[in-house]
Image (cartoon, coloured by chain):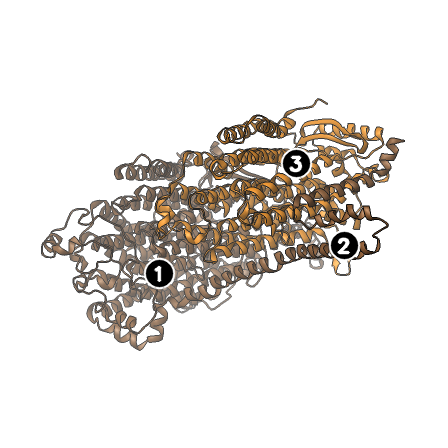
Chain colours: A orange, B brown
Amino acid sequence: MTNSYILSFITWLPAVGAILILALMKKDQSSLIKKFATAWFALDFIASLWLLKYNRSTGGMQFLEDYQWIPIIGARYQMGVDGVSVLLIVLTTLLGAIAALSSWEYIQKREKEYYVLLLLLQTAVIGVFASMDLFLFYLFFEVSLVPMYFLIGIWGGENRLYAAIKFFLYTLVGSVVMLLGVLKMYFLTQDTALTSRISSETVNLLAGNEQAAQLVSSTLQAAAANGTGTFNILYMQAMGSVLPMGTMQILLFAAFALGFAIKVPMFPFHTWLPDAHVEAPTAGSVILAGILLKLGTYGFYRFNLPMFPAASRDQSSWTTSFGTFGVRSVIVFLAIVSIIYGALAAMYFVVKRDGDVKKLVAYSSVSSMGMVMLGLFALNPNGVNGGVMQMVNHGIYSGALFLLVGIIYERRHTRNVAEFGGLSHVMPGYAAIFLGMVMTAIGLPLLAVFISEFLALRGAFEANPWWAAWAALGIILNAGYFLWLYQRMFFGTIDNPKNERLPDLKGREWAYMAPLMILSLWIGVYPKPFLEYIQQPVNAVVKQVRPDYVIGEKEPQITQNR
Amino acid sequence: MQKYIWLVPLLPLIGAAINGLLGRKLRFSERLIGGIAVGSVALSFLISVAAVYSYGFGGHPEWPKPYLTSQDGFSFNWIPGGAVSINQGAEARTQIELQKQVEERLATMAPEERGRFQSILVSDSPRFALLNIEWSYQLDPLSSIFMLIVTGVGLCIFVFATGYMHGEAGFYRFFAYMGLFMFAMLVLVMGSNFLMMFVGWEGVGLCSYLLIGYYFDRQEAANASRKAFITNRIGDFGFVLAIFGIIATFGSAQYTDVFEQAKAYPIELLGQWGILSWIALGLFVGACGKSAQLPLHVWLPDAMAGPTPVSALIHAATMVTAGLYMVTRTNVIFQHSQTMLLVVALVGAATAIFAATIGITQNDIKKVLAYSTVSQLGFMFMACGVGAFVIGIFHVMTHAFFKALMFLGAGSVIHGMHHEQDMRRMGGLKKYMPYTYWTFMAGWLAICGIIPFSGFWSKDEILWNAASTSQIPLGWLVWLIGTIAATCTAFYMTRLMAMTFWGRERFLEAPAGGEADEAHAAAYDKGLTQHDAVSPAAGDRPRHEPGEHVGPVHEDVAHHVATHGHAHEAHGAHEHGAHIPHESPPSMWVPLAVLALLAVIGGFVGIGPAFRTVTGSEHPGGRMNIVTWLNPVIWNPTTREFNAAEGGHGEETSHAAPAADAAHATPAEADHGTGASVYGHTGFNLAHSVENATHSELATEWIFIIISLVAAGIGMLLGGLFYVWRPQLPAIWAQRLRPLYAASYNKYWVDEFYGWAVTRRTMDAARAVYRFDAGIVDGIVNGLAALSRLFSRITGNFDKYFVDGIVNTVAAFIMRLMSPLFRAAQTGFTANYALVMVLGLMVAVAIFFARDIFSAFR
C-alpha cells in the first residue's frame, strides 16, 4: 500500500503554522499575526478541498496512511477518511478560516497566543476526524480540549474561569470513562476465540474498498508479529459483528456513549454548553458549536453504531425485571427530550424580557444535536444520512448565528435582546443574513437544514412514527422562538438611541458570512453531491448494525405488490 | 410548449432576485422595478396559457395523463435519500393481496366447492424502495387550472400593486417578496411530488410572513406575521407526518407512484382508522393551517395587516387555496377514508358559518373580507368533503376572481380614503369612486350568488352536491349550514356595500366614528372589548408624501378639494376627518375592470347540469367545461379508477363529481354486494328524499337552485333593510341580541382562548424548563463539583491533622511530598487537575500494559 500524504498534510499544517508564529513573530506584530494566521487557515482549507476527490462510488476508507508508531501496544499512526469525515474535515477547515477572519477586531489582547491556540485546535480536531487508529483518535480527542480550555479561559467573558473549568472537567470525565472502554476493546482484539469468528465479508463491508481491507490485514500481521492487539478502528468495528450481546457489550456501549454524549451534548449532560458558549469569544463559539460538538455525534457514528451493533439495535437479549430494555431506547429517549427540552429552554430567552441571544443559540444547539442523535439511532439509511447531514448543517447555521451575535456584540457590547429592536432600519444587510440563517435554522425548504431534518425525521418515522411526531413538535417550537427573537431584534421602531447609528455589515464581515449563506442555499437546493459523499459509508454502517436491512442498490422493488 | 413550463416558476424568481439583490444597491426606479416584476409574471402567464392550451386542446397525445418535465429532461435528482423500508399499511396490502388470491382461487374452483372455501393467510413480506426525490414539474388538469389562476390573477394584482405601492420606501423589497411568492406558489401547484408541494407550502408561508410583516415597524404587523407563520407550522406538523406516512406506505413521494398504488387500497369505512385515514388526517391538518379552517383560522384575519395587494394575492386568491389544491390532489387518499371525508365536510361547514357570523359585525373593511374569505374557503372544503372535489376547485377559481376583485376594490377605497379602513367613516363613495364602485358591485353580486354571476354557479353546485351526496352521511346538515352561511354572506356583503358606497358621506363628519354607526359605537361605549381596528393606524397604510396626490383627480373630487382644501394638506397618519376620497389611477382600476369581467363571466365554464335543457348538455363546452376538464384527476370510488378522460354527452356521463356517480351506481352495485356497498345510503339524504317526492331529478335540482337564490335574496334584502332603508335597526338588534352580538364582534374569543391556552402555557413551559435546567440539572452538576471539593477538603484536613498526627515520624518525608499535592488539588486550577489526571492515566495504562511491557523486556 502506498501512503497518501494529504491527510497528514491537512492535519499538521495548522500546527506548523502555530510553530511558525511562535518562532518568527513578535507579540506586538498583531496585525501581521492575524493576517498570517488567517492566510494559513485559508491554505489549510484549500488543501482540504483535495479530499473532495474522495471516490464516492467506491466508498469506504480512502487517502490511507499507515506508519509504525508504538509497536509495544500495537498502536499505529493510521489515517484514513470516509465520506462523512471528508465533509466534516472540509467544514472544519472552512469554519477555521472563518473563525480566524472573524477574530480580527474581536480579540484585542494576546493575539499571538490566541491564533496559536486556534491553529493547534484545528490540528487536533482534524486529527480526530482523520484517525483510523483508536489510540491516535483518543489522543487527538483529548488534546482538543486544551486549546479550547484556554480560548474560553483567557479570552472569555466575565465568568470565563467557571465556564472553562466546567467545560474541561465535564468532558474529561466522559473521556476517562471512554478510555476504559478503549482499553477493553484493545484487549478484546487479542481474544482469538472472538476474533477468529470475524468474517472477511464484514471487514470488506466496513473497509469499503480493497486498499482499506488490505490495510486491516497488514495491521493484523504486524500485530501478530509483535504479539500485541491492535487499535485499528476498522478491525474493532468488524469485531463488533461477533461481539456477543450481553452486559459486556452494553457496558462498553455505555462507556463510549457517556464520553460522546457529554460532547454532543445530550440531555442531561448539556449544562456545560450554554456556559461555555456565553463566555467563549465568538470564534470559540463558532468552533465549539460548529466542530467540537460534532466530535460527539461523529463518535457515535464511527464507534458506537458499528462496534456495538447488537446493543445499538436493542437486540432483546438483555432482559431485566422491567422487561426488555436497551441502550437504543435510552439514547432515542434522550435525543427526543433534548430536542424539545432544548427548544423550550431556548425559548426562555425570548420569553424573558432581557434574554441573552447567545444562550438562546446555545440551547437551540442542544435541540439540533438531538435531531442528529435521533437520525443516527433511527438505524436506517434515511435517518443516518439525515443525522450526518444535520451535523454539517448545524455547523453551518449555528456557526453563522454565533458570528452574527458576535457582530452585533462588537458594535454594542451587549447581547441582551431587550437592548435591540428595529435593527432592520439601520442594518438591512445584517437583517437579511440573519433572516436567512434563522430560516435555515427552522428548517425552511431549499435551505440546508430542511434536507437533514426531513431525512432524519423520515428515518425516525420509519423506526417509530411517534418518535418523528415528538421530534417534529420540537421543530414547531424552534420556529416559535427564532421568529420571536427575530421580531424582537429587527422589527418595530428603533427605541434605543444607541442603535440609531449602527453600521451595516462591512466587507470583512460579508466575506465570512456570505460563504455560509451560499453553502446553506446550495445544500438546500442541490444536496445530491453532499449526500453522495456519505451514502456508501452510511449504508455500510446500517448494514453492519442491521444485517437484515435490504439496501436497494438499483431499482425500487415495490413494483410487484401493486 | 409543455416542456417550457419549468420557466413558469423560474421567471418570477429571477425577477425577484434582480429586484431584491440589486434594487436597493443600484437605486432602481419604481418603473423599472415594476416593469421587471410585472414583465416576469406576464411572461409566466403567457407560457402557462400556451402550455395549457397545447396540453389540453393542442392534441397532447397523452391527455389527460400528467406531463412531467422529467420526460424532456428538465428535472434533477433533488434528495437521494437512500433505502427505505416500507413498513406501514401492511394490513391494507395484505387485504388487497388476499382479495386477489381469493378471487384467483375461486375462479379455479367448481361452483359447489366455493361455499366451503375458507380464507387464506397472506403475509406482508418486508419491502424496500429507494427514496429519490426528484425536482420536476407536472402539468395535468389540476395544476394547469392553478397555474392559470396564480399567474393570471397574480398579473392583475401585480399591475394594481405598481399603483398602490407607489411612493413606498420599500418598493423593491415588496416586489422581491411578491416575485418570490409567485415562485413558491407555482412550485406548490406544479410540483410532481409531495416534497415539492411542501417546498412551495413552506415557501408561500415564508413570503406571507415577509409580506404581512412588510410594515415591520408596526408591532401588530410583526405579531400578525409571526402568528401566521407559527399557526401554519402547526398545520405543517400534520402535513410532514403525512408525507412520512406516504413514503412509509408507498415507498415514494411522486404523485403518480403514490396514487397508482393507493387506488387499489380497501376503502376505510366510517370510524375505521386505517393507514390512509391517518395520512388523510395529517394532510387535512396541513390544509386547515394553510387554508385557515377551524381551529387554525386565527391567523388569516390578522394577516390583513399586510399591504392590500398582498391580502388580495396571498390571503384571498392563491395561497389560502393551497389546502384545497392539496385535498383535491390527494382525493384518492381522502376518498378512501369515509371518516376523513365527513371530517372535511363538517369542518368546512362549521368554518363557513362561523366566519360568516363574525363577518356580520366587523367594521374594518379588510377584516370583513378576511372573514368572508375564511367562510368561502369553508364552502370549498364542504364541496371536497361531500366528494365534489371538482366543484371545490371551481369555487376556488370563481372566488379567486371575485375576492381578489373585492380586495383590490377595498385597496382602492383605502387608497382613495387616505388610509382609512373603518367602514363607519366611509359611505357614499360611489359618487367619488365610480370605477371602484361598479367593479365592486360585480364582486358583490358574484359572492352573494346571484345568477348569472360567477359565484352563483359554483356556490349553487356546492350546495346541491351537499344535498345530494351519498358519499358521507349528514349531507343534509352540511347543506343546511351552507345555505344559512350563504344567507349570512349575502347579508354582510350588502352591509359592506351599503356602509362603503351608499348612504351618508360620513367621512365629512368629524369627529369620525362617534356617531357614524350607532350600533357599533354604542357597543364600543358599553365596553365590549375589541382589540382590532379602531385605532386609526391599525390598517394597511401606504405612505405618501404630504400634499402628494396619486393619479388623476376626479372632477367631483377636484370640486371638493377646492372647498376642503385644508384637509388635503394634512396627510398625516393620525389625521382622520374630512379627507375627500378620490378615484384611483388607471394602473389600479384597469386590473379591477379585468377582474370584474372575470367575476361576471367566469362562472360560465362550469354551468351545472340543471341547465341541460338550456345548454343541451350536462357539462357544455367540452374541455372548456371545468368539470370535464378536471374529472380525470378525480378517483371514482365505484369503479376504483380515475374518471375517464372525456365522457360522451349521453346518459353515461358522470354527474358533477364522483359523489353523484356513486349515488347513481349504488343501487345497481348493491346487488353485487362487493366493494361499492360501502357507499350505501348511510344517512338521511335531503336531495334523495325530495327526489323521491318529485320523481324528477331535474325538478329537484331546480328546487335547490331556487332555494339558494331565495337565501341570497333574503340576505341581501335584510342587508338593505338594516343598512339602507332603516339605519336605526342595527343598533336596536345589537341591543336585543347582545350576547350573540358580543360573541360575533369579539370573534367568539378564540384568539383570547388560544393566547391563554397555548401561547401562555408554552411560555410557562419554557420558564419551567429553564428553571429546571438551571436549578436541577445544572444544580446536580455544580453540586457534584461542590461535593468533590468538600470531599477533597475533608481528605485534606484528615490528611493534615489525623494522618499527619499518627504517622508523623514514620513517613515524614513522604508526607511532605504528599500534602502539597492534595492541597494543590483544591487550588481550582484545571491545568493541575488535568496534569494529575494525565499522570493517573499514564499509570493506569502502564498497569494495563504491564504484561506486555514485561514481555517486551523479556
**Residue B648 in view in this figure:** no
Describe the element under mark 1 as helix, strand or loop. Answer: helix
**Residue B709: percent from the left, percent from the top?**
30, 64
| Front position among marks 1 and 3 | 3
Q: Name, please, the residue furthest toward the front.
A: B809
What's the amino acid at mark 1? Tyr
Report the label total. Answer: 3
Q: Quadrant of residue A118?
A: top right
Q: Considering the numbered disc 2 on the image, is that residue within a helix, a strand or a loop?
A: helix
**How far, Cα to Cα, is label 2 from label 1?**
81 Å
The answer to whether residue A216 is left or right of residue B518 is right
Looking at the image, which residue is at 85% across and 51% down? B809
- In the rendered image of this protein, does residue B376 appear above or below residue A15? below
Which residue is the site of mark 2? Answer: B800
Could you say which disc has been placed on residue B149 in the image? none
The answer for how far apart the CA atoms under marks 3 and 2 are is 43 Å
Foreground: B296 or B569?
B569
Q: Residue at 35% of width from left, 73% of height from top? A: B740
Q: Separation of disc 1 and disc 3 at Cα?
A: 59 Å
Instruction: Please tell me which residue lies in front, A150 or B183.
Output: A150
Say which residue label 3 marks. A128
